[in-house]
Amino acid sequence: MKIAGIVAEYNPFHTGHAYQIACTRAALGPDCAVAAVMSGNWVQGGRPAVLDKWTRARLALLGGADLVLELPTVWAVSSAETFARGAADLLALTQVVDELSFGSECGDIGKLRQVACCLNTPKYQELVRSYAQQQIPFAAARQRAVAELLGPEWAALLDTPNNNLGIEYLRNLERDGWAMGAVTVRREGALHDSLLQEGQRPRFCSATQLRAYLEREDWAALEPYLPEGGLEVLRDGWNGFPSLKRAERGVLARLRTMTAEDWAVIPDSGAGEGMPPRLERAGRQCRSLEDFVALAKPKHWTQARMRRLLVWAWLGLTQADRPGQPPYLRVLGFNSRGQEVLRHMKKRVHWCILTKPARARSLDGPGRRLFALEVRCTDLYDLCLEQIPAPGREWTTGVVRVESGE
């Protein structure tokens, strides 16, 4: 049995994700099992996920995935480079995944691999550092470096987000020598982060559009883009559109007590640029989250980077909380074929596979600390919901099981 690994946020799962899974099976064989690594309750753009991770895992299983593993928050809420590295490492550490499958605007694995190899060269690193010293934004710096080394056609591949992530996955596989192949599925339909015009009903739309439907609770518009039975699952798990604004006073309380030293130990906080004192001042002066971003954000930083900083500050995370590699494999859900994948994993993996929350109590130091952080991350995520659940859901929510044909 071939096993494909897919990295996703499924925020939420939609027909475009189902299309990628179907194309992956078409390429690797109809019996191919799909193991998805999915962000937990916080996502890469520095926002709470629109549905909790167990509901999103169930939707993914209904849509064609067989096994859903969690990408811990310390990798999930990170730059594209760190997000991709944590996810690729996690798939490799299962020791059963044959091929990593990802969507891309390009659809040409050879071209993407060539750029990935370029990004692993010392000359590329040297060029990026020199551009960064000129306060050129990182995304622009890496494109300039690739244009200089390979040419503008290759640099243009970095213009789009799915290409970018795919290149980072390939970069990590090549750099770390993981024994996984890779395939890419060309992204079809709406562009990443795009919104539809009134009356448009294409075959695929972006997750951004689905989140817009969710925010106004337009279930009729949403249903055609969900897997069969997905609307019922979504509505059962619905607790209002999550927003950090619901926890704003708590976040502001945290910001007002943070020192420059506290900011300096958060990844991507600009310690090398002398940013922590500016972040401290902004935290003590702001009256809203928007105020904080306006006071603190340098022109060459992205909004997503600022949102990630806010989330890390709110969650009380630091660089030291991110281990070199994931110390355990957390199972969020599976079906019968996913159960077979788990059996293969248990024969090969010599560290903890968490299929029950109680097993986290037997973890060693790094694993126990990371799981405790996930408990905190979920409890604080729950403050962003319409109705606040009882604390401790990490300990009381079991793995999602979906029977074949459900």
Image: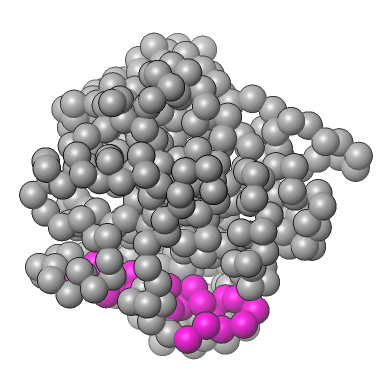
Q: Is residue 36 visible?
A: no
| Residue 190, picture quadrant | top right
Q: Can you give x and y, in whole percent of width and height, for residue 302 in the image?
A: 54, 51
33 or 45: which is nearer to us? Answer: 33
- In the figure, 153 relative to 339: above or below? above
42 or 356: which is nearer to us? Answer: 356
In the image, residue 222 lies in the stretch drawn in magenta: no
Quadrant housing the N terminus: top left
**Residue plotted at (51% across, 22% down):** 23
- In the figure, 168 relative to 296: above or below? above
| Residue 188, picture quadrant | top right
Classify residue 233 as left or right of residue 337. Answer: right
Q: Can you give x and y, in whole percent of width and height, for residue 401 in the image?
A: 42, 56
**Residue plotted at (67% across, 59% down):** 232
Main secondary structure found in the magenta portion: helix
Classify residue 99 as left or right of residue 367. Answer: right
Of all residues, the one furthest to the right in this rendering is 199
Classify residue 92 as left or right of residue 59. Answer: left
| Residue 189, picture quadrant | top right
389 or 303: which is nearer to us? Answer: 389
In the image, residue 379 lies in the stretch drawn in magenta: yes
Q: Can you give x and y, in whole percent of width and height, for residue 296 in the image?
A: 53, 67
Q: Can you give x and y, in whole percent of width and height, for residue 321 in the image?
A: 24, 66
**Residue plotted at (43% across, 85% down):** 391
271 or 335: which is nearer to us? Answer: 335
Q: Is residue 165 visible?
A: yes
**Residue plotted at (24% across, 73% down):** 358
Start-end of magenta stretch:
368-390
